[in-house]
Image: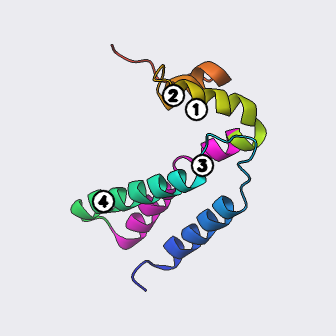
Amino acid sequence: MFLGVDTVKTLALLVSAFSSFNTSKCPRFSIGKLQRHSTQVAAIAREIAKSQSLSKPALDDIFAAGLLHDVGQLVLIAHHPEQYDRVLRRVAAGDKTVIEAERETFGAPGCRSSR
């Protein structure tokens, strides 16, 4: 009752997505680390939303968004595991952030920095 039906649905979706995911083709990727990160982001986002006195449905939506904010990594790994492993190698070497390495590897446009 504390979490709400929508949040429980989102959690079930997340558990299903993470538990059925095969990371053998991208050994540097940690599904557990992504799960922990997503859960932490969701909890922090909900606390920020609470501080703004948002409605319960809004809190549930914000929590769900926090849980699912990095789901794109799963899509990239599922369809391009070798390339994503290259992304993680560059990040581990300290060359790039995840976002920078993803953009360079997959050619996706990103926000321009004002630096």
Identity of the amino acid at label 2? Val
Give the residue pinned by disc 3. 71
Label 1 vs label 3, nearer the camera: 1
- Whether residue 70 sits left or right of residue 17 in the image: it is left
Image position of 35 (left or right of 86)? left
Label disc, if present, on residue 88 of the rendered structure: 1
Find disc 4 in the rendering and name its residue: 49
Give x and y (percent) for residue 111: 47, 23
Residue 11 location in percent, x, y? 55, 69
Q: Which mark is residue 110?
A: none
Q: CA distance from mark 2 to mark 1?
A: 5 Å
Q: Earlier in the sequence, mark 3 or mark 4?
A: 4
Q: Residues within 10 Å of mark 3 (few under 14, many from 20)?
A: some
Main SS class of the magenta portion in the image? helix
The quadrant the N terminus occupies is: bottom left
Query: Helix, strand, or loop for circle 4?
Result: helix
Q: Are marks 1 and 3 in contact (CB under 8 Å)?
A: no
Element under label 3?
helix
Frontmost of labels 4 and 2 is 2
Provide the residue designation for mark 2. Answer: 91
Dot 4 or dot 2: first in sequence order is: 4
Q: Real-space Cα distance between discs 4 and 2? A: 31 Å
Coloring applied to the structure: rainbow
Q: CA distance from mark 4 to mark 1?
A: 32 Å
**Disc with the residue nearer the chain's start (4 vs 1):** 4
Sequence-wise first label, 2 or 3: 3
Give how far apart the Cα atoms at labels 1 and 3 are: 16 Å
